[in-house]
Amino acid sequence: MKDYDCEKCGACCSYKWSWPIFRRDRSDATDIPQEMQRTDYPLMKTENNRCVALQGEVGVAVKCSVYNCRPTACRKFEPGSELCIEARQNIGL
């Protein structure tokens, strides 16, 4: 089994403008600062397909600035899953 070091990778948070998504009612976003949330759709804001909560250099060392209150989609994301591998491939890891 390949070792997926999330604190080094960050691919899941930096490859798609539509990620991470909130529940439709935004109940999983109550503790996330409003300035990090899109107002037109239940998503975190992104810059250059990268979640604004992601800090650090992808593939080197990263962390989530809202980790303790991150959206459900982020909590359920599995290292080594098909989505993880897709994200890693998309950014060249």
Image: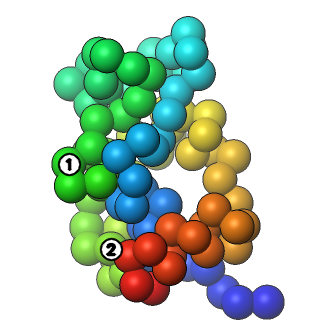
**Viewer-proximal residue among 59 and 46:** 46
**Residue at image point 30% right, 54% down:** 50
Q: Is 1 left, or right, of 28 in this rendering?
A: right
> In the rendering, at what x and y percent does residue 71 appear?
53, 34
Q: Which mark is residue 86?
A: none
Q: Is 61 left, or right, of 85 in this rendering?
A: left
Amino acid type of disc 2? Val
Residue 6 visible in the displayed image: no
Q: Which quadrant holds residue 14?
A: bottom left
**Viewer-proximal residue among 90 and 24:** 90
CA neighbours of label 2 inside 10 A, class few (<14), some (14 to 19), many (20+) = many
Disc 2, SS: loop
Q: Is 39 left, or right, of 90 in this rendering?
A: left
Q: Which quadrant holds residue 45?
A: top left
> In the rendering, at what x and y percent does residue 29 appear?
47, 22
> In terms of sequence position, does the residue under pointer 2 or pointer 1 come before the other?
1
Q: Nearer the viewer, mark 2 or mark 1?
A: 1
Q: Which residue is mark 2?
A: 58
**Residue at image point 61% right, 40% down:** 73
Which image quarter is the C terminus in?
bottom left
> In the rendering, at what x and y percent does residue 79 appear?
66, 68
Q: Which residue is mark 1?
A: 47
Amino acid type of disc 1? Glu
